[in-house]
């Protein structure tokens, strides 16, 4: 269900500036937390003084950098196999859209471009889950494909990061605003592909989806707008 990483602009491909990099995600969590709390260190509402900010993730890819940044991490994924790779964080095997931990966190992260899923009902369930788990005064960090990113997609375009080649091999607009694509990944002699569908959302569409879930768009954390911050409405 997760979407692949962005191919990136020509500048990003030359300089390796990938906005989904785990360390950059960790910095964004801390930046969002500090900006919402006046720069003060904060913690989960029900945690003792010694605890650091909490974060909830879809999947565990970024959890080491979040832990290094001093965050208390809860990693959520529906795949037990994926969660088996998580170290040093609390794990929950569940579908993100059905999650209800009965806890609230200062920072909630919805990564992997899940907000661009074509299924509007599923998008709402995912954002409602984020709203259920973010504390008052907290932030929801959302990785999404802004409309200009979709407009730049083309089959045959690719790049390389950390020794892994990434190329979009197929692209089709299957219905107005909904794209089907296939990515090809290569690492040495290993090759694998991933197919997915993505809905082209405008900023107004994103804001409306957030509002239906009880959240408000508070701005963007990157120049290319691939990371958005939402707050409780």
Image (cartoon, rainbow, N blue to C red):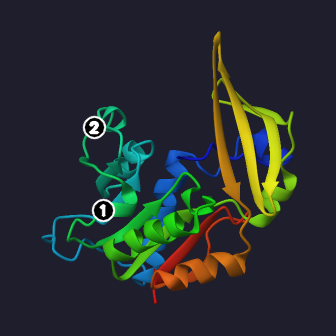
The x and y percentages for residue 16 are: 71, 40
Q: Which residue is mark 2?
A: 87
Q: Is residue 122 above or below residue 66?
A: below
Identify the residue at image location x=16%, y=74%. 46
Residue that carries the numbered disc 1 in the rendered image: 99
Question: Which residue is located at x 16 percent, y 65 percent?
Answer: 50
| Lower sequence index among marks 2 and 1 | 2
Look at discs 2 and 1 and give the one toward the viewer. 1
In front of the other: 155 or 137: 155
Q: Quadrant of residue 100?
A: bottom left
Task: Give the CA separation, mark 2 to mark 1.
Answer: 21 Å
**Which residue lies at the image location 85% right of the left edge and 58% below the top edge?**
151
As drawn, the residue found furthest toward the top would be: 189
- Asked whether 154 or 90 is in front, the reply is 154
Say if 206 sits above or below 155 in the image: below
Please indicate whether residue 25 sits to the left or right of residue 15 in the image. left
Numbered disc 2: secondary structure: loop
- Disc 2 crowd rating (10 Å Cα; few below 14, some 14-19, many 20+) is few
Residue 36 lies in quadrant: bottom left
| Disc number for residue 14 | none
Give x and y (percent) for residue 162.
63, 29
Q: Is residue 41 visible?
A: no
Q: Is residue 91 left or right of residue 181?
A: left
Q: Residue at x 61, y 68 (%)?
A: 221
């Amino acid at each position: 269900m997760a979407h692949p990483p962005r191919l990136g602009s020509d500048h990003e491909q030359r300089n390796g500036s990938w906005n989904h990099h785990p360390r950059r995600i960790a910095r964004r969590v801390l930046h969002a937390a500090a900006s919402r709390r006046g720069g003060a260190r904060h913690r989960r509402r029900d945690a003792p003084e010694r605890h650091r900010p909490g974060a909830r993730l879809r999947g565990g890819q970024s959890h080491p950098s979040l832990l290094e940044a001093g965050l208390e991490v809860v990693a959520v994924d529906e795949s037990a196999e994926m969660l088996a790779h998580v170290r040093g964080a609390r794990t929950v095997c569940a579908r993100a859209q059905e999650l209800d931990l009965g806890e609230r966190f200062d920072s909630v992260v919805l990564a992997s471009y899940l907000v661009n899923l074509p299924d509007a009902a599923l998008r709402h369930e995912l954002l409602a889950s984020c709203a259920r788990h973010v504390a008052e005064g907290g932030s929801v960090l959302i990785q999404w494909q802004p409309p200009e990113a979709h407009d730049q997609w083309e089959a045959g375009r690719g790049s390389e990061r950390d020794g892994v080649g990434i190329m979009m091999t197929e692209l089709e607009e299957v219905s107005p605003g909904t794209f089907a694509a296939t990515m090809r990944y290569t690492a040495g002699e290993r090759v694998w592909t991933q197919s997915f569908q993505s809905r082209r959302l405008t900023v107004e569409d994103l804001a409306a989806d957030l509002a239906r879930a009880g959240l408000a768009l508070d701005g963007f954390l990157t120049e290319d707008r691939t990371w958005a911050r939402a707050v409780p409405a």
